[in-house]
Image (spheres, rainbow, N blue to C red):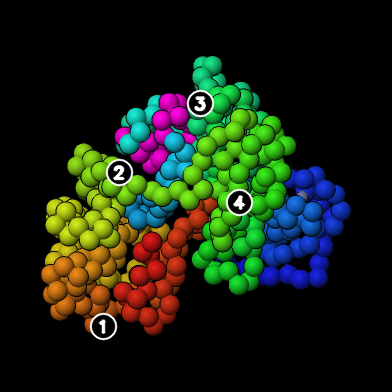
């Protein structure tokens, strides 16, 4: 999925954000997994600085049912704590009814119900959302939010659109419906990639997550996000700009916010502990919760609390993958004959390198067993990753996966470190 940077070319397209007609500078072209690897062109509006593709056809998220990307998401890929950050910008006692549009698996809904006691609902047509509805027992409507969506007259005190508005061809339509179901004194909070990061200097991993061809349609600048929110009846708009992301809170009335939200790590850890204790660690979802709990304990330096989580991981890894986490030097990666990502996922746990890394940190910083710490980072000699990486060329999540390709000739562990978030 190579990006080709283009200079000195313009095309005439109307801006879907500010409606400005006239020439738009072409920034790049890139292949789209969703469009059968056709090349899409990304242009930028000189007036509002939004970037948008020449084809604004949205992906049909309801049609994708790949098991490999889902397993990766719940075991390793989903940055659950990062998803929660927008919630900590607001005062939780102001919220009773909470809606997340495009909620995916529903991590933020599940956390908010546990941590704040909010009444939570989600809306999302994807199979990932269907899995979350079942696994986490969440109230998720399996459809898109449209003018016809009926919540039975309910309005919500808080609506979250996390990494959603960039997937939508008509942001005015989305925001009109959101405003209709938002309580008069409620707030919309949203996150979206920052169009200012579309530059050759941005690292390829970050850039791919931002341009996400075929999935993302419109990328906002700080100014264009403020514009589209105000133009849709949100009189109070605050946008925070980060190198790769924009966060916003929009409301009809003045709404108190924290300018530098901090995720309550202790509360997050209690949530993970509760989920780890109640879900089977032999399922990808349960394995993902227990891995995140283990990681959280190690990062907090609470090694005694990390041990039971590690023991649960070890108990699951042995029968499922034939791996003894206490003997990492014996782990052998067998080259894959197939490049089928779903098949790869059946045979491997995506958080293995993360588990070994944090186990190594424990051995080094807690027990001072440096030989053992080294064993978690030394592959068995003579083994190598497949010469080509496992690659799913079937689903739009391909573009959103956080997997980097191992470099030819690199050691397995070095290569697999790119999986750790
Ligand atoms: Zn514009």
Farthest-out residue, right: 22
Q: In whole angstroms, how far apart are the C-alphas of marks 1 and 4?
A: 41 Å
Q: In whole angstroms, how far apart are the C-alphas of marks 2 and 4?
A: 32 Å
Instruction: Look at the image and say whether residue 99 sits in the magenta stretch.
Output: yes
Seen at 20% across and 57% down, the residue is 302
Q: Residues within 10 Å of mark 3 (few under 14, many from 20)?
A: many
Query: Is residue 366 shown to the viewer in this render?
Result: yes
Q: Is residue 89 left or right of residue 238?
A: left
Vertical comparison of 219 with 190: above or below: below
Seen at 65% across and 60% down, the residue is 196
In front of the other: label 1 or label 4?
4
Q: Specify the quadrant of the image occupied by residue 274.
A: top left
Give percent across and percent down for residue 84. 42, 45
Residue 156 — which label? Answer: 3
Q: In whole angstroms, how far apart are the C-alphas of marks 3 and 4?
A: 26 Å
Q: Earlier in the sequence, mark 2 or mark 4?
A: 4
Say which residue label 2 marks. 267
Vertical comparison of 156 with 5: above or below: above
Q: Earlier in the sequence, mark 3 or mark 2?
A: 3
């Amino acid at each position: 999925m190579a990006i080709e940077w283009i200079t000195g070319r313009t095309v005439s397209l109307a801006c879907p954000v500010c409606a400005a007609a006239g020439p738009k500078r072409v920034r790049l072209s890139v292949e789209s997994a969703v469009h059968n690897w056709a090349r899409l062109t990304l242009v930028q509006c000189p007036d509002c600085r939004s970037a948008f593709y020449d084809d604004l056809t949205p992906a049909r998220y309801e049609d994708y049912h790949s098991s490999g990307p889902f397993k990766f998401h719940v075991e390793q890929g989903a940055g659950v704590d990062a998803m929660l950050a927008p919630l900590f910008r607001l005062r939780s006692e102001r919220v009773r009814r909470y809606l997340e549009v495009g909620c995916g698996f529903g991590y933020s809904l599940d956390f908010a119900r546990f941590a704040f006691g909010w009444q939570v609902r989600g809306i999302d047509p994807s199979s990932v959302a269907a899995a979350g509805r079942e696994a986490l027992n969440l109230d998720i409507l399996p459809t898109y939010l449209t003018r016809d969506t009926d919540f039975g007259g309910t309005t919500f005190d808080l609506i979250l659109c996390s990494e959603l508005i960039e997937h939508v061809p008509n942001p005015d339509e989305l925001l009109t419906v959101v405003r209709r179901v938002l309580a008069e004194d409620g707030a919309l909070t949203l996150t979206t990639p920052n169009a200012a990061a579309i530059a050759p200097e941005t690292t390829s991993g970050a850039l791919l997550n931002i341009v996400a061809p075929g999935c993302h349609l419109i990328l906002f600048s700080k100014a264009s996000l403020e514009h589209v929110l105000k133009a849709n009846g949100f009189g109070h708009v605050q946008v925070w700009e980060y190198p790769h992301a924009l966060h916003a809170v929009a409301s009809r009335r003045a709404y108190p916010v924290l300018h530098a939200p901090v995720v309550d790590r202790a509360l997050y850890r209690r949530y993970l502990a509760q989920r780890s204790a109640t879900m089977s660690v032999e399922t990808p979802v349960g394995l993902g919760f227990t891995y995140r709990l283990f990681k959280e304990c190690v990062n907090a330096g609470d090694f005694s609390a990390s041990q039971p989580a590690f023991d649960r991981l070890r108990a699951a890894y042995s029968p499922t993958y034939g791996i003894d986490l206490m003997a990492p030097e014996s782990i052998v990666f067998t080259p894959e004959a197939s490049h089928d990502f779903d098949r790869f996922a059946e045979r491997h746990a995506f958080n293995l390198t993360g588990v070994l890394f944090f186990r190594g940190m424990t051995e080094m910083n807690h027990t001072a067993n440096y030989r053992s710490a080294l064993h978690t980072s030394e592959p068995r000699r003579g083994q190598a990753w497949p010469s080509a990486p496992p690659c799913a060329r079937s689903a739009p999540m391909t573009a959103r996966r956080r997997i980097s390709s191992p470099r030819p000739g690199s050691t397995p562990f070095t290569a697999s470190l790119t999986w750790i978030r």
